[in-house]
Amino acid sequence: MRFLARPGQRYAKAYFSRSMNISYPKLVFAAILTLYFLWIAYDPMQGSFLDMVDLPIHETGHLIFGIFGEFIGMAGGTLFQLILPAVFVGYFWWNEKYFSAAIVLFWVGQSVINVHVYAQDAVRMELPLVGGGIHDWNWMLTHLGLLDSTKVIASLIRVIGALTIVAASVTSIFYAFHSPERELEEI
């Protein structure tokens, strides 16, 4: 009953009952991603190579969630943009690929930072929109009566994104230092 021992029970045995097995390629990769994504968190307006991945996912979210009503359809772009990378994190974690889960967690953090950029633009509406359509965050915050709170909401989203990136950094470096022996043999 392998699924009943998920993930914490075997985690302690696998990672703390033996000495460290450092994977230098993983450590270098984690360090490079840490620097890159912390830079994105520091200066989100510079964008990221993942922005062009996030955009079609965001637009697909409107289509998927649109069947649940107007508000959920509008929020669906942001929801799907956050849910999809989180599903990949969960997949890797469930399959005990903890380093891979930590690496994909960078994408989740970047995606949250990307949402911050969009939410921050809700009042000014200066960002180019796909097809010149409706600004999601302006529409949602207006309907919720929170447009005057845009700055606070966008700042909170940015903090969540930055903390997610920090968690990805710490976790990926940790698992670079605690690589399972079978993975070290494969490198």
Image (cartoon, rainbow, N blue to C red):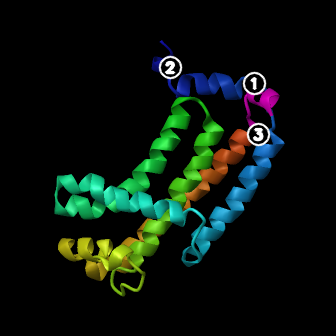
Place of residue 168 in the rendered image (x, y in percent of width and height, measured from the top left) = 60, 51
Q: CA distance from mark 2 to mark 3?
A: 23 Å
**Residue at label 1?**
182
The question of residue 160 being in magenta is answered with: no
Looking at the image, is mark 2 or mark 1 earlier in the sequence?
A: 2
The front one of 133 and 158 is: 133
Q: Magenta part mainly helix, strand or loop?
A: helix
Q: Residues within 10 Å of mark 2 (few under 14, many from 20)?
A: few
For residue 177, side relative to residue 60 (left or right) = right
| Quarter of the figure with residue 102 | top right
Query: What label sits on residue 5 in the rendered view?
Result: 2
Q: Residue at 43% across / 67% down in the picture? A: 115
Looking at the image, is mark 2 or mark 3 earlier in the sequence?
A: 2
Q: Residue at 25% across / 71% down in the picture? A: 140
Q: Residue at 58% across / 54% down in the picture? A: 106
Place of residue 86 in the rendered image (x, y in percent of width and height, measured from the top left) = 46, 47
Tag 2–tag 3 contact (CB < 8 Å): no
The front one of 168 and 68 is: 68
For residue 26, side relative to residue 57 (left or right) = right
Place of residue 76 in the rendered image (x, y in percent of width and height, measured from the top left) = 30, 58
Q: CA distance from mark 2 to mark 1?
A: 20 Å
The question of residue 186 being in magenta is answered with: yes
- Residue type, numbered disc 1: Arg
- Residue type, numbered disc 3: Phe
**Residue at label 3?**
177
The magenta-colored residue range is: 177-187
- Closer mark to the observer between disc 3 and disc 1: 1
